[in-house]
Every structure is written in C-alpha cells, then in structure tokens.
Amino acid sequence: MRSEAGSTFLVTGGAGFIGSHLVEALLARGCAVIVLDNLSTGVLSNLDSVAGHPGFRFVHGSVLDELVVDELTHQCDTVIHLAAAVGVKLVVEQPLRSLTTNIRGSEIVIEAAHRYRRKIMVASTSEIYGKNSHGPLAESADRILGSPTVTRWSYSTAKAVEEILANAYHRERGLPTIVVRLFNTVGPRQRAAYGMVIPRLVGQAVRNEPLTVFGTGEQTRCFVHVADTVDAILRLLDQDGAVGGTFNIGSGEEVSVLELAHTVIARSASTSRIELIPYEQAYGPGFEDMERRVPDTGRLRALTGWTPRRDLADVLDETISEAELALARASLVAS
C-alpha cells in the first residue's frame, strides 16, 4: 500500500546524505516529514530545498534524548531510523561514540515506536556481513568478524544489535518493522569527511591531487545511486509484505577500488596519479578489510520489482560535476 498523502514520517538523521534525499521524496508524495538530527554528521544545508515546505519541520536534537524521541514519535505515523555514527574513518577513530549512538540510540527509537505502535524502518548496513567476501551476499549469509579488539568491527556489531532488537520487537511484541541493509550508497551531498571513497577520490581528481587508494586497491565494491536507494526504501514502505523482513539495497555492478580510481581520473580529465596507501597508514595498525562486498537483491526485486536505474558512470559524472562546481565556488570566494 502506497504511503498516503497526509501521513507523517519521523526521519531520524534526516539532515544526512541519504536522509535529505528521502525527505525530499516523501514531501513530493504529499506526506509531512519531521526530521530529528543533531547535525554531528548531517548538514542543515542538505535540507535547503525543503526549508520552506509547509509539510516539513526540523528538530535539532539527538536520538539519545528519550523525551524528544518520545514526543516526535507520538506525532508521527511512521518512523524511518537513519541516524547513526557512520563511515569507516569515524568508526575507527571514535568507536565509543559509534557504539553509544548506534546501540542506545536505536534502542530508544525502537522502544518509542513500540510505545505508540508506529511502523518503523531501521537502516542497517552491509557491514553486517563483516569479512564475508563470498557473493553475492543474501540476507541470510553468515556474519564473519575479526577479534573484538579490532575497532573496525564495532560498527558491524552495533548494527547487528540494532537488527536483533527490531526483529525481537516484531516477533515478540508485534511491532511492524522493516530492516534495510544499505550497500555503498553514493551521489550528491555525500561528503568525503568520514572515509567515503567516491567523494574522496573525485575531490582529489578535480584538484589534480594524487588519488589515495588504500591497501592494494584490488578489493571490490558495488555503488548504488542515492535516488535508487530512496526508490527502494519507498517501495518497501508501500508493501505490507515487507513488514518483518530484512532487505539488501545495492547495485550488482562490481568494481575494484583501483579500477574506480582510474575511471575517476578518465571521466574528470584529471592529471592526477594514483598513490597506494597501506591500511595501517590510513587507519592505524590492525585494520582489517574485506575483499568483496556484493549484494544479492533478489528478495527486494521479488517483492517490489525494484532495479537500479543508474549505473556507476552516471554516479561518477554527477559527483564530478558537483565537485567541480564546489571547487569553482571556492576559487571565487578565495579571489
């Protein structure tokens, strides 16, 4: 069933990269949207396009604030929980913050949804699979993690707890939940600050700086445009059959990070060279990565008919254009 015009959504983390695109799409449907964001990683300017919309309200606050979460959940019909400490760099550098936000914050939001019997979608991550490099990875695939002393796996562990909470509330207390596992979503408004690879490489390329590729560069990833991710989210929200389920959202177009860097240089007409950086230098000693991360999206396709409409070339060209525009504006300000 399609989300009806006039229904109200609470989007935690709605000032973030994915959240801001989702807010725009919900408002375009005629829904009202309340955004809760503490702006620790989100940016208020991401919501400039909807700032004057009569159906939009922004609340500067944290998912760790139980009273605020309770009040806003009471005012909405559906909760979309995107707020999280994200990005490999942030997780490695601030594991305690990641654990607190991702575990306690999710517990507070899920509890509030249960209190008021609100449908809730919880945004999880491909990090759930850990070092499982088999693929494509189905939602039932095993989690393979390293030692608890390796901070890289704290994010995966926190998001697993979040998923377990959501599933337990659904099974034991009848809470209508949907879990989505997002694989490398990219596109406009994504920032390089937290280790996101495409905006980092594109930014380096348009400045003609060396493109820093971590490890050997042979590790492969799949990148999906944020508009396709939002489309998948909306389709799942429209389907009663999605309730109680877990769904991968991602592209099947696999590319090595080294090949990605070469493609970025070619499409941006950059004079940059590629520089390989050991993981230890980029993230500190003991860092572990996975060789492949490819999603199996068969469950999502079977229920909703979803397929990505944009390929990697579309993503890169759009990101390059945005980076070039930002560089030009910065140059004008500096002059």
Image (cartoon, rainbow, N blue to C red):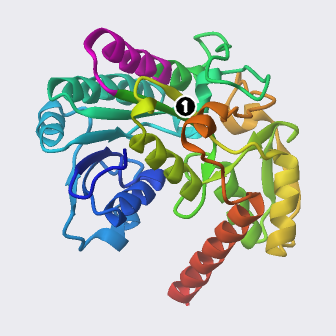
Please provide percent x and percent y for residue 103: 37, 22
Please provide percent x and percent y for residue 326: 57, 76
- Compared to residue 29, the image places residue 289 above or below, namely above
**Residue drawn at x 27%, y 41% as measured from the top left:** 78
**Residue drawn at x 43%, y 39% as measured from the top left:** 239
Residue 145 can be seen in this image: no
Identify which amino acid the numbered label 1 is placed on: Phe
Dot 1 alpha-carbon crowd within 10 angstroms: few under 14, some 14 to 19, many 20 or more: many
Please provide percent x and percent y for residue 104: 31, 23
Please provide the residue range marked out in magenta.
Answer: 159-176
**Residue drawn at x 36%, y 30% as measured from the top left:** 101
Q: Is residue 210 magenta?
A: no
> Quick one: quadrant of the C terminus?
bottom right
Q: Secondary structure at mark 1?
A: strand
Please provide percent x and percent y for residue 148: 58, 11
Extreme residue in the front direction: 1
Q: Main secondary structure of the magenta part?
A: helix
**Residue drawn at x 84%, y 75% as measured from the top left:** 269
Q: Which residue is mark 1?
A: 247
Closer to the camera, 41 or 168?
168
- Compared to residue 5, the image places residue 100 above or below, namely above
Q: Is residue 173 magenta?
A: yes
Closer to the camera, 195 or 301?
301
Residue 268 can be seen in this image: yes
- Quadrant of res 150: top right
- Quadrant of res 332: bottom right
**Image side of residue 64 versus residue 260, left or right:** left
The number of numbered badges drawn on the structure is 1
